Image (cartoon, coloured by chain):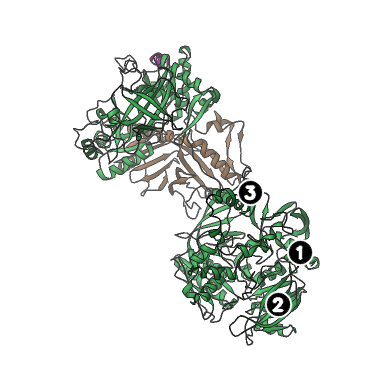
Chain colours: A brown, B green
Amino acid sequence: MAAIARSPFAHRLTGAGQTPQNENVVIRDLSRLPRIGFKGNGTTKWLSSKVSAVPDIPNKAIALSDGALIARLGKEEYLVLPDPDAVGNVCRDLEASWNADDARGERRIGYPLPRADSHSWLHLEGRCIAQMMAKICGVDLRSERLLQGEVVQTVVARISAVLIREMKNDPYGLHMLTDFASADYLWDVLQDASTEFGGGFSWEREDLK
Amino acid sequence: MNSATLRKGLLIDASRKLKFTFDGREYEGVAGDTIASALAANGEWILSRSFKYHRPRGILTMAAQDANTLVQIGNEVSVFADRHPISDGLAVRAQNVGNSARRDSGFVMNRLSRFMPVGFYYRTFYKPKGIWEKVWEPIIRAKAGLGKLDVTKPTQGYYDKAYGWYDVVVVGAGPAGMAAAIAAADAGASVLLVDENQRIGGALNYARLATERDLVSEVKGHSKIEIWTDAICNAWYADNWLPVIRGNRLYKVRAKQVILATGLIEQPSQFRNNDLPGIMQGSAAQRLIRLFGVKPGNRAVILAANDDAYGVALDLLEAGVDLAAICDLRKAGHHGPLRSEITQRKVSILDGWCLHEAQPEKGHSHVRGVELAEIDAEGTAGRRRRRINCDLVCMSVGYVPAYQLPLQAGGKLAYDDVAAQFTIDGQGKGVLLAGSVDGFFDLDGCIAHGTGQGWTAAINCGYQSKRRPALPVRDRGSPNHPCPIFPHPKGMDFVDFDEDLQVKDIKNAIADGYRELELVKRFSTVGMGPSQGRHAALAAAMLVSKYTNRTISEVGVTTTRPPVTTEKIATLAGRKFTPFRQTPMHEQHTAQGAAWLLAGNWLRPAYYGHERDAKRLIAEEVVNARNNVGMIDVSTLGGLDVRGPDAAEFLNRMYTFAYVKLPVGKTRYLLMTNEAGTVVDDGVACRRGENYFYVTATTTGVDRIYRNMLWWNTQWRLDVDIANVTAAYAGVNLAGPNARKVLARLNHDIALSPQDFPYLAYREGTVAGIPARVFRVGFIGELGYEIHVPSRFASELWRAIGDAGKEFGIRPFGLEAQRLMRLEKGHVIIGQDTDGMTTPEELDMSWAVANSKPFFIGKRSLEIRNKTLSSRKLVGFVLDRMPTAGLQESNLVVKNGSIAGFITSIAFSPTLGRVIGLAYADRLDADLGSRIVLRASDGSEHHARVASPHFYDPENLRQEM
């Protein structure tokens, strides 16, 4: 695909960048990174044949050796996120692999989902994430309740969201995927909710490119 | 009554002076003072005026439990003066006063009270006919209410909400609550301890109670206990859902177990002028002394019915108050440990005496003395009297449990007539009571009970713990007098301070036939004021029981409902989440001057330009699209990927048309009916592959349609996958005679000739280098291409089309122009031109129903409904010009004086130069050329001619070119 892709938050990432005043709540926009989903009959079997492992139950995520996350959202539904700090080719490879299998006429291999276009992707990290999320989400996300790799499919500030607790324990980290079209709304919600903790969005000039 | 030398209190820092005003006069207080304590320290005892009679009122509880202390701060009304802290420059005003709390002309109402017996308004204001609206209502409206709210001013402050989760929530941080919290936390539970006061400890902070355990330190030092002070748990809802208000935030707390250690509410006694400033609960005097270092008076009389009263007496003596007498309602022989201490102080104790009357200073500004009476054999004030000068009366005659939360949690209140005590039982699973609210009155018993209940709560949460703590035995005695009510022949013996209700009011309500307490409440309004009967419910029940010859347990108490205490609208409103969605081209629309319109939760351009030119701009957008080329953002259109071997069969069942034989690369109209055969949605099905359909749905309907699809296929178990890809794809509709030329200018790999890409065809390729799904549709009735691309690339597509169309004079058009053009074309909008009964036949869309199919949702119903057609039909109509009165959607179509239908769409068509519309009309009037009558909002009627709804290009030559 052409390299013109834009994050739905792009118009809010302006100026020379922004760094929150502390590390209580740091929100990064990862929407420009690739991500892909697979869903439908046969997905689990097909995906298991392509990656080293998949989560054994829904609402769990595991990390692959390259740092990519495979989150199981349902019996036959998955979300794949690359390691934001070392983006590999897992999404591209899986998409190509699925297209090749489909072209070969293989059936019951599930279907790809355009998660890069349907969902924005934010990464929330810091000491007060769970506390901040308690202002906008009715699910208990405190570290002792939401363990590493656990997935919550819920509502955040009245919009649907997929939340994935990061694998590392400290600092607490959360991936949040929500409706692409609600990005502007979500920006204001998060900015408002994080102000109390001296937190907010973080970006650098390079992110604007 | 200067108490400057005494200002040592648990909550204050006397070294930090603060200045504030009350009713415009400046006062000095200290840090930690409440408004009420600071005023009291300045000798200012009148805080408010009563609701009806404007009688001066002062401190009653010092616990934010009564309406006496409600004041106004800025634009915030009904603030508890005995809870709100002072600050430098704080401006406080009395409520419900003509001038000030000190001088209120409304006090004349006190003299007129005899003309306002209970329920007088039910009998007075309704006659003669019409007088209510003209005379009484304006007067009462002007008089009603407490504070004055300026609704034009925005609420000050930031209010929001948050969730909280705990194993155990303990409400009330008194001795029992603290012990419960410690026991639960020791067993491993995460505990939230909530208390409405500034400081935990409850009565330990102000009453003469002593325990070896330092519960406060234990609680504060416990890692598993979170403490929220100044936090009010204002209700209990199912599944232990607790709204806890803390500052400007409403916490929605969930707990596995709730322990209610809400304690007791001290009750007043009823005697003449029992509402004078200077007459207060014994606990209020103790709070003033211990918490705020305020001497509550110089010479006091105590009305006693329990040993706590003697603790009050000791505190007063230690504070330097001269104790004139203790008047004990009980006969001699009740000797608690505190009374024993008092007897050594040579204080006059009158056993078996009551307060018959309090005598006021001029203007009822304060109590100046009391008349005592010996209680006779009937328990009423006898003839033996004694008068004593005093400026303070403290009442310690009994308590009721703070039963609001326990009862909301399903508890049932019973009354032990012998012990004069309420008991609570039967609250829901997961809710425990601890301490005095459950009838444990001595300190050791409270702590032991709290410990036991905390342990139980932790075990109920699944924690393992050592052996169960021993539960204490309930004290068989109670601190409550069975009936501390001493009616006075001249009245003013208030039962309900909020509503100025006297003993005779309750008596007269019963005499009027309202024998049940719930009826007495509604007739007299007892317990319906801001304090919600905290100090009136028991007295009212006692009176009803007395005058109906029943026991209190037979009379019961009235229902208690949330909220427990006052809460602000701002707290409830909090920060509101109102999601909205934007298309990826939103910024570009803004730059192009879009005026916005909300379609569902999507922000869509209504038109481009200034509002004052809206009509002209919309018309120009229409003309440009009709004669040249226009572009509209259709990203909000629902998009569903339907994939799988059974995809065609699935659509066949979901929609009325047939899709099994639809060739790949073609589109077909979709019409959906529900089980009743009513039209609920429409769209287009694009066949991308044998097993793959890209389906569009209406902007506002797609989420519902998606849910419906999942729901139905859960039953059908077809091999199909449905994905809602609405946000994943953005769309642009490029429409107009020059649309093909513009598309040709874009970098694309799709053959565009009419033969290669005919009307209703579907193609895939790249447009402006972007992977695209392109199909030819004609919603507005012109040559048009709908180009759908992944959302990430949408703004680039919009820019590219705009650039390519420049030489043709392309301009964007908004939703208004689109709606107008589709009306010219006669295309219906589901939801606007349909209602909850519309069938395809009424829309003349039977062509979109494949009756030969064995099944589709609604087929059976349509077969039945089509046998007996409805009396209406959707028709097109025209008018030469818009009537002066204006005609709008939803205006009625009338026939012979009856409603025949209504207008669903109407607009002036710039293309046709006349007013066109769609309306439901009598089926008999559906023939072309018939006349229908449209009734405008002002009642005027206008004749319209029925015409084909396909007003524009009925042969479809333009869209199929």
Q: Is residue B551 above or below residue B750?
A: below
The reply to whether callout 3 and callout 2 are in contact (CB within 8 Å) is: no
Q: Which of the two residues, B707 or B944, is positioned nearer the viewer here?
A: B944
Q: Are marks 1 and 2 on the same chain?
A: yes
Query: Is residue B252 at all visible to an observer of this figure?
Result: yes
Question: What is the tally of numbered marks visible in this picture?
Answer: 3
- CA distance for labels 1 and 2: 27 Å
Q: Where's residue B761, x and y in %?
A: 30, 22
Residue B328 located left or right of residue B675: right
Q: Is B634 rendered above or below residue B453?
A: above
| Residue at x 55%, y 69% (from the top left corner) | B508
Q: Which mark is residue B371?
A: 2
Q: Quadrant of the C terminus of chain B?
A: top left
* Residues packed near mark 2 inside 10 Å, few (<14), some (14 to 19) or many (20 plus): some
Q: Residue furthest top?
A: B807
User: In the picture shown, does residue B137 fall above or below B318?
Assistant: above
Q: Quadrant of the N terminus of chain B?
A: bottom right
Q: Secondary structure at mark 3?
A: loop
Query: Which SS class for mark 2?
Result: strand
Query: Magenta segment: does it hold B154?
Result: no
Q: Which residues are magenta?
A: B736-760
Q: Amino acid at mark 1?
A: Ala
